[in-house]
């Protein structure tokens, strides 16, 4: 028997404002969702996935407007309904789980207080009952110490735990529909498995319908009953998940299936003095050691990927190398010579040698500065360039990152796509003419097509400029694409390191095996098999 239709969207048109003009974002898309069904929305950045997901709540972001079509939620016309009625539905019958739980929770309130607010305000249950319900849902979401974890503040739990707490909070009023907007993008592979399994279980247990927005095809394969593909606001195709994975019909969908085919050519063995050597470093915060006697080298023209789950010490290692955190023991060498432990004691040239590209280009670039200022400042500071020489260098760097200088030099970051912003982060790092660039999760927030473009760009720049890269990532597909050597970290220690080929083909440590086995595959049965093999409920 076919399930009852919960949500029907017909001819949906959404526009965004640029200055005084409006331009189309979603162009006449149709969508039907049945009760208890999970629909996957996929497509590259700018496809309109999140905009469509929010429209399912009768909501449009600032600067956007729903200009055409109908949105029918269980017999309620969300376009015509009064705003008070729409607010009454949001949180109670329609819930939203954002990509970044850390940015979405109120940092000044405990988790359980934020959980209880929805059901109390909507009159679903009194506070005492909501607290008991929170503990039960925390247990179902596989959170540790479910009786106590709600009494922590958001900063006192891990990213994966916070994402599960947000999903539990979305379920507090037992909604009919949840919109999941990239809920696992920023998580490491082992944490992602826990969150995916928990989300899938709780949606099934309560018969909740869901729209699952993602650019990760392997993830959507585990979660969705059907998949809809979008491109620049238009629908490309839609089918049940198994049919879509087995035989996509449209060329664009086939191109999505084929991305991440890029693999860096094998490099010769490292010789000579390393650009950077980390030697027996122990470091931490307060009395806690976060890094425990770690050592590895990075040579010119080579990429060392540092992998491990959240809290393993990857970013702390970068802080030690850049001088932002002084080690308790050990040292960092640049070109065989010890670096001062603090950046404050390093010369301008020592600071110049090591630059960083950050995970979130949105927050790493000052929105009030034009691109010429963002790229030009390091060149002026470290190399002393001014006037025409500085202008020429900025233009050269824009050309190097494949952006037309005349078109982009005077733009602000807000006028760029996510991939273009990340390219500006790369140009800013290159402006100092460093020997080492630390890439901290630089592709994790990008869709797979843009990711591939960034990886190819980094590979070309490395070959042309003989750069050393330290690539911090939880994405093992990225490691396969670009790394020469891999350093595996767990709980602040290096548990395994070696050439990429050897580590992927014959890992020696159980933890490395765990990481490799946790990489999702484009197979709807993969998560079930993995959980069964680990003795967990599938």
Image (spheres, grey):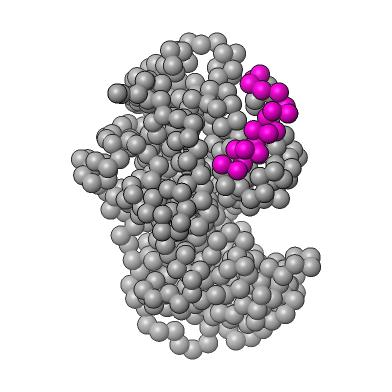
Can you give x and y, in whole percent of width and height, for residue 489 in the image?
56, 70
Q: Residue at x 56, y 13 (%)?
A: 85
The stretch of residues the image draws in magenta is: 122-140
Q: Main secondary structure of the magenta part?
A: helix
Say whether residue 304 is left or right of residue 285: left
Q: Quadrant of the N terminus?
A: top left
Q: Is residue 364 magenta?
A: no
Residue closer to the observer: 346 or 305: 305
**Residue 482's x, y, as percent?**
40, 67
- Residue 338 picture location, percent across and down: 67, 83
Residue appearing at x 43%, y 64% in the figure: 516
Q: Quadrant of residue 325?
A: bottom right
Q: How many marks?
A: 0
| Residue 439 vertical position relative to residue 447 in the rendered view, above or below | below
Instruction: Name the residue at 57% across, 33% down.
Output: 170
Left or right: 333 as drawn, with respect to 232:
right
**Is 304 rendered above or below residue 413?**
below
Q: Nearer the viewer, residue 189 or 144?
A: 144
The reply to whether residue 12 is in sight is no
Would residue 123 be counted in the magenta stretch? yes
Furthest residue toward right: 287
Does residue 195 show up?
A: yes
x, y percent for residue 372: 55, 52
Frontmost residue, 208 versus 227: 208
User: Residue, x 49% and y 21% (percent of image)?
Assistant: 58
């Amino acid at each position: 028997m076919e399930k009852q239709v919960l949500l029907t969207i017909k001819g949906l048109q959404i526009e965004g404002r640029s200055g005084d003009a409006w331009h189309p974002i979603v162009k006449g898309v149709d969508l039907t969702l049945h009760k208890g069904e999970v629909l996957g929305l996929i497509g590259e950045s700018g496809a309109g996935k999140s905009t469509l997901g929010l429209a399912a709540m009768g909501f449009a972001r600032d600067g956007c407007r729903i200009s055409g079509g109908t949105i029918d939620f269980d017999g309620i016309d969300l376009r015509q309904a009064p705003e008070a009625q729409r607010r009454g539905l949001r949180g109670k019958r329609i819930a939203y789980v954002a990509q970044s739980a850390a940015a979405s929770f109120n940092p000044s309130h405990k988790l359980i207080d934020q959980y209880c607010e929805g059901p109390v305000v909507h009159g679903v249950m009194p506070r005492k009952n909501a607290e008991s319900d929170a503990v039960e849902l925390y247990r179902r979401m596989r959170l540790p110490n479910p009786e106590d974890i709600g009494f922590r503040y958001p900063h006192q739990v891990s990213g994966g735990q916070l994402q599960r707490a947000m999903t539990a909070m979305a379920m507090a009023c037992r909604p009919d529909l949840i919109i999941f907007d990239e809920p696992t993008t920023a998580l490491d592979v082992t944490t992602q498995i826990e969150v995916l399994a928990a989300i899938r279980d709780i949606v099934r247990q309560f018969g909740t319908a869901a729209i699952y927005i993602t650019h990760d095809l392997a993830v959507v394969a585990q979660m969705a009953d059907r998949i809809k593909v979008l491109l620049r606001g238009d629908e490309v195709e839609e089918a049940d998940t198994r049919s879509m994975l087995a035989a996509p019909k449209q060329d664009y969908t086939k191109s999505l299936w084929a991305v991440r085919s890029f693999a860096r050519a094998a490099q010769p063995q490292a010789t000579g003095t390393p650009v950077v050597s980390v030697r027996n470093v122990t470091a931490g915060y307060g009395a806690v050691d976060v890094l425990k006697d770690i050592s590895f080298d990075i040579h010119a023209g080579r990429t060392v990927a540092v992998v491990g789950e959240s809290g393993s010490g990857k970013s702390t290692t970068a802080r030690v190398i850049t001088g932002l955190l002084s080690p308790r023991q050990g040292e960092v060498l640049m070109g065989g010579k010890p670096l001062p432990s603090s950046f404050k004691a390093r010369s301008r040239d020592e600071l110049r040698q090591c630059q960083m590209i950050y995970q979130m280009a949105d927050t790493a670039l000052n929105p009030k500065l034009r691109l010429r200022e963002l790229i030009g400042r390091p060149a002026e500071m470290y190399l002393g360039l001014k006037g025409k020489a500085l202008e020429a260098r900025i233009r050269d760097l824009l050309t190097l990152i494949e952006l037309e200088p005349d078109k982009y030099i005077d733009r602000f970051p807000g006028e760029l796509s996510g991939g273009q912003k990340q390219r500006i982060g790369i140009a800013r790092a290159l402006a100092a003419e460093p020997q080492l660039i630390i890439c901290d999760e630089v592709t994790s927030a990008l869709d797979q097509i843009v990711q591939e473009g960034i990886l190819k760009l980094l590979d070309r720049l490395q070959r042309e400029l003989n750069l050393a890269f330290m690539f911090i990532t939880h994405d093992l597909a990225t490691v396969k694409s670009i790394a020469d050597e891999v350093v595996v970290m767990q709980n602040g220690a290096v548990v395994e390191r070696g050439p990429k080929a050897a580590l992927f083909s014959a890992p020696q440590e159980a933890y490395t095996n765990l990481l490799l086995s946790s990489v999702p595959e484009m197979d709807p049965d993969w998560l079930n098999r993995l959980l069964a093999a680990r003795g967990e409920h599938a």
